[in-house]
């Protein structure tokens, strides 16, 4: 009996000794919940995953964090729909036990997932979801390192004033992003005293034939057309606006950085020429040493310039690793305190989260630039910066008559 | 609103409605012969657009779109025949008790399968073939060359379909099967083989719509979803099983959606068709050209 007991105790001790290093080396899981299939903007999601993977690889190549623990990414597809986003987050938090979730792109999805993240007590990061209300709710577990819509609208209003546009038409999808931008534009037209007429049309994101809407806008004779589609709709609008003759005769502004991706020219061909679009990164930008190192590795690996989504996802993984290192813990409460108390090296500057007024709550914003393509198949690196004035490399070029 | 502008909206609606009617024709043709609803019709539309794009991008070059179109239709026809032979035929030959449920489950499973296969093979991004023709003007409407090609292609295919069903032996067999599946077997027609052909022709019509609209509505894994809904709306509006109803229903739906989205709100564009459908069902439950079922 005594011998059997001694054997059992010995076996337990051996098992504990063997298990201890394994436990110490258990990876820290970070969720990447992002659109990887339609109707979401799958192109954006793929770039976000690319950046996140490079971040995890960098941390792991340096020996990991918290005593050598590796970062393991758990990638989930939210397909750009709130229901899939919620299901994905529930799985990441409950089954995979992730320390945090990054990768949110569509505002409508994040609107749903951030409420669940609050219940499940898991930090969730907007990588490219910009609706104002996401951070305006002042939720404990929501963080964002991306621009917010009021800033986006303020910038395009300044551009409208500077360019002297008199009739501005906005065609926006019926999502939190599209509707939010339309409402914000109306509001800021009044508050910024923009001396231009505004026409706004909101369309159903699922609709593929937008000919009646672009015809209506064309007949209204705007001198600026703002395309607020995300993913496939941004291309459908551009194509159909071109076919009825609305663009490029009327200058067009695309509300986000889709034209920076290689797929832009493949999808639109010459119809994409003369578009102006908003970006948050340009190859001529001065980056932090961390950002420069990422850019070099990205160029080596993919033979193309990094796109903002990849840069931002990379920076979010790095800042999470830094926050856990500073906290010496991957526990949620410690991570939250660390995120709020520390400053982190991002891709183009220092990131810090403060609890400011309105939407400036646990929010950090990158810069915004307006770029214009002036010839077909123009590389992103050669697009001209047309706004803001202190950074611009060329004036807005009008398209010749077709 | 001036009449010029109104005419543009009307024309725009009629053009897209005509192209939608191809899809509806495929659905109603399959229903007419096989008495089943093919829920994966949109995916055959999607496959048609992918085949068209793949042929143009890799084998034929962008200028030979007119050659790629029949090849895309033929490919999807063959796929349809195979699907019918191995997945749907047991429904009729194997003594399946609940045929409707069987067909629903099989075609919904196909819908999911094809959509996911498209993501696996082609990735989740959208593609676009180069324009089939330059933008032009149709009466008062500035129209993309692709849309005009789509319209002409639809008219040609509708005429060919009319000739097939009215002027050929196989067409008479199709019409016979649509009227009485048992009766036609007494005349020596192999109705199971006829089903196979009917399914192939029906999905090939959907593929034609996908291929014709590919440059305008793009090629991506879910591009058939909307057109499927439109197709179902059209056949109910036009009357289930009525070929003329498919065409008239398509034109009507296109018109209602175009005008509704301009005069009311484009945010509810898909709602207008459903309102038309509900209103019509209330007053004419068989649709515009449908007939009451007669049983003995």
Image (spheres, coloured by chain):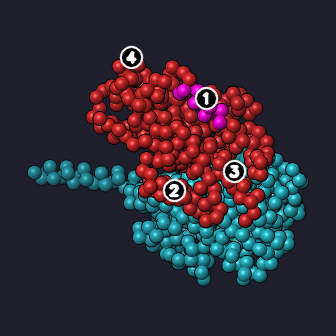
Chain colours: A cyan, B red
Task: Tell me the quarter of the picture where residue A186 sits.
Answer: bottom right
Q: CA distance from mark 1 to mark 4?
A: 26 Å
- Discs 1, 3 touching: Cβ within 8 Å: no
Q: Is residue A301 highlighted in magenta? A: no
The answer to whether any part of residue A249 appears in the image is: yes
Residue A211 x %, y %: 69, 54
Q: CA distance from mark 1 to mark 3?
A: 24 Å
Residue at mark 3 = B11
Residue placed at 65% from the left, 62% from the top?
Answer: B262
Residue B276, label in figure = 2
Looking at the rendered structure, whether the residues under marks 1 and 2 are on a common chain is answered as yes
Which type of secondary structure does the marked residue at label 4 adopt?
A: loop
Of labels 1 and 4, earlier in sequence is: 1
Q: Residues within 10 Å of mark 2 (few under 14, many from 20)?
A: some
Residue at mark 4 = B188
Of labels 4 and 2, earlier in sequence is: 4
Task: Tell me the quarter of the picture where residue A171 sits.
Answer: bottom right
- Discs 1, 4 touching: Cβ within 8 Å: no
Of labels 2 and 3, earlier in sequence is: 3
Q: Residues within 10 Å of mark 3 (few under 14, many from 20)?
A: many
Q: CA distance from mark 1 to mark 2?
A: 30 Å
- Name the side, left or right, on which A106 lies relative to A18: right
Q: Which residues are magenta?
A: B155-166
């Amino acid at each position: 009996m005594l011998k059997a007991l001694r054997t059992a105790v010995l076996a337990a001790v051996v098992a504990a000794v063997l298990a201890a290093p394994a436990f110490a080396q258990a990876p820290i899981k970070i969720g990447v919940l992002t659109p990887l299939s339609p109707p979401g903007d799958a192109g954006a999601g793929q770039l976000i995953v690319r950046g996140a993977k490079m971040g995890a690889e960098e941390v792991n190549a340096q020996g990991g964090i918290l005593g050598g623990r590796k970062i393991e990414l758990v990638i989930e597809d939210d397909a750009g729909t709130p229901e899939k986003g919620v299901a994905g987050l529930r799985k990441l938090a409950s089954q995979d036990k992730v320390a945090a979730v990054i990768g949110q792109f569509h505002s409508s999805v994040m609107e749903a997932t951030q409420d669940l993240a609050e219940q499940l007590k898991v930090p969730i990061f907007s990588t490219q979801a910009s609706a104002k209300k996401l951070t305006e709710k002042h939720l404990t577990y929501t963080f964002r390192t991306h621009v917010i819509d009021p800033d986006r609208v303020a910038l395009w209003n300044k551009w409208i004033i500077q360019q002297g546009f008199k009739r501005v038409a906005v065609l926006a999808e019926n999502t939190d992003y599209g509707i939010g931008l339309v409402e914000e534009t109306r509001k800021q037209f009044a508050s910024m005293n923009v001396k231009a007429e505004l026409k706004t049309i909101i369309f159903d994101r699922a609709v593929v034939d937008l000919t009646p809407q672009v015809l209506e806008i064309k007949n209204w004779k705007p001198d600026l057309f703002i395309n607020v589609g995300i993913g496939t709709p941004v291309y459908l609008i551009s194509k159909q606006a071109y076919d009825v003759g609305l663009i490029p005769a009327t200058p067009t502004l695309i509300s986000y950085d889709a034209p920076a991706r290689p797929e832009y020219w493949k999808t639109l061909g010459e119809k994409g020429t003369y578009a102006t679009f908003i970006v948050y990164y340009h190859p001529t930008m001065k980056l932090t040493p961390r950002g420069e190192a990422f850019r070099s590795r990205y160029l080596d690996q993919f033979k193309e310039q990094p796109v903002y989504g990849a840069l931002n996802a990379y920076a979010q993984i790095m800042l999470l690793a830094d926050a856990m290192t500073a906290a010496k813990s991957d526990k949620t409460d410690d991570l939250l305190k660390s995120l709020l108390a520390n400053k982190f090296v991002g891709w183009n500057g220092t990131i810090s989260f403060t609890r400011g007024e309105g939407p400036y709550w646990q929010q950090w914003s990158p810069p915004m630039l307006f770029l214009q393509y002036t010839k077909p198949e123009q590389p992103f690196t050669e697009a001209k910066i047309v706004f803001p004035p202190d950074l611009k490399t060329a004036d807005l070029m009008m398209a010749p008559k077709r | 609103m001036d009449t010029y502008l109104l005419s543009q909206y009307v024309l725009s609606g009629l053009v897209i409605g005509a192209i939608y009617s191809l899809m509806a024709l495929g659905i109603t043709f399959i229903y007419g012969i096989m008495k089943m609803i093919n829920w994966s019709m949109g995916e055959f539309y999607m496959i048609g657009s992918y085949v068209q794009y793949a042929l143009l991008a890799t084998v034929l070059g962008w200028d030979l779109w007119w050659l790629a179109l029949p090849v895309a239709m033929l490919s999807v026809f063959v796929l349809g025949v195979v699907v019918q032979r191995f997945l749907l035929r047991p429904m009729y030959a194997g003594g399946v008790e609940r045929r409707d449920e069987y067909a629903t489950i099989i075609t919904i499973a196909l819908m999911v399968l094809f959509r996911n296969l498209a993501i696996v093979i082609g990735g989740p991004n959208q593609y676009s073939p180069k324009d089939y023709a330059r933008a032009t003007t149709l009466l008062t409407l500035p129209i993309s060359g692709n849309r005009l090609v789509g319209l002409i292609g639809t008219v040609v295919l509708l005429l060919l379909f009319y000739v097939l069903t009215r002027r050929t032996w196989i067409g008479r067999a199709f019409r016979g099967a649509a009227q009485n599946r048992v009766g036609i077997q007494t005349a020596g027609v192999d109705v199971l083989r006829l089903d196979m052909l009917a399914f192939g022709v029906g999905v090939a019509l959907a593929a034609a719509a996908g291929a014709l609209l590919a440059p305008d509505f793009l090629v991506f894994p879910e591009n058939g979803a909307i057109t499927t809904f439109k197709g179902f709306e059209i056949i109910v509006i036009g009357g289930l099983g009525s070929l003329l109803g498919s065409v008239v229903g398509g034109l009507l739906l296109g018109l209602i959606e175009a005008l509704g989205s301009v005069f009311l709100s484009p945010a509810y564009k898909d709602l207008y068709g459903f309102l038309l459908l509900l209103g019509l069902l209330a007053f004419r439950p068989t649709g515009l050209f449908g007939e009451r079922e007669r049983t003995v």
